[in-house]
């Protein structure tokens, strides 16, 4: 060891040991670095089979909402239905309450404008089994039928009763159109 480094090392060791052996002094006031805001607040509400989670961030004041039901979620004014991931839903057809058929491909540009990726990275099944339905088509609806493969003898059926009710409740709880992202 070089002799010129020894006094510096001894001074550092002494100051470190002094810091570690003395108890910290506390004053009556909280340190300036502590947050003076309330913790974030979350609420969970169930309406039938729907589950609405509302989270309010105390610091930013932002409200984030999540609406789910088994195999379904609502994001960006769109109901996303999760079929099994092995099923290619890119050519799927869906009906709302036995109404007119809608092809998933016809909605792709609308979904892209809402920020959804058209396909995922899986080359075997780029749809990932997802069927996205614009929320405005679901007003008053009770069921959605999906035929993922042409001429399937039995299409998938999803009950969405109570969807309007839970969306109205979400609006009352502060979930605007941008809250479901």
Image (cartoon, helix red, strand yellow):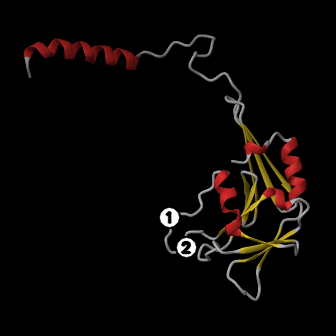
- The numbered mark at residue 66 is none
Question: Are there few (<14), some (14-19), or many (20+) residues within 10 Å of tag 2?
Answer: some
Whether 80 is drawn above or below 12: the answer is: below
- Quarter occupied by residue 74: bottom right
Q: Position of residue 45 (x, y in %)?
A: 83, 51
Vertical comparison of 141 with 89: above or below: above
The answer to whether residue 94 is above or below residue 133 is below
Q: Quadrant of residue 143?
A: bottom right
Mark 1 vs mark 2, CA separation in Å:
9 Å
| Secondary element at tag 2 | loop
The residue under the point 82% across, 39% down is 174
Residue at position x 73%, y 59% in the image: 73
Label 1: few (<14), some or many (≥20) within 10 Å?
A: few
Q: Which mark is residue 121?
A: 1
Q: Is residue 117 left or right of residue 39?
A: left
State how many labels appear.
2
| Numbered disc 1: secondary structure | loop
| Residue located farthest toward the bottom when viewing the structure as drawn | 153
Q: Position of residue 103 (x, y in %)?
A: 73, 71
Query: Residue 20: image x %, image y %?
Result: 38, 20
Q: Residue furthest left?
A: 2
Badge 2 is on which residue?
Answer: 125
């Amino acid at each position: 060891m070089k002799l010129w480094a020894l006094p510096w090392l001894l001074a550092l060791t002494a100051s470190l040991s002094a810091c570690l052996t003395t108890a910290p002094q506390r004053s009556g006031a909280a340190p300036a670095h502590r947050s003076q805001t309330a913790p974030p607040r979350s609420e969970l509400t169930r309406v039938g089979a729907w589950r609405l989670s509302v989270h309010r961030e105390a610091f930013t004041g932002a409200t984030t909402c999540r609406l789910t039901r088994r195999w379904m979620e609502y994001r960006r004014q769109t109901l996303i239905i999760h079929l099994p991931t092995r099923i290619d839903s890119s050519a799927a057809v869906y009906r709302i309450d036995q109404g007119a058929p809608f092809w998933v491909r016809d909605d792709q540009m609308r979904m892209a404008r809402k920020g959804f990726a058209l396909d995922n990275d899986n080359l075997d099944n780029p749809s990932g089994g997802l069927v996205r339905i614009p929320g405005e088509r679901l007003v008053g609806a009770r069921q959605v039928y999906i035929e993922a493969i042409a001429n399937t003898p039995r299409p998938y059926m999803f009950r969405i009763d109570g969807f309007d009710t839970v969306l109205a409740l979400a609006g009352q709880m502060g979930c605007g159109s941008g809250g479901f992202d």
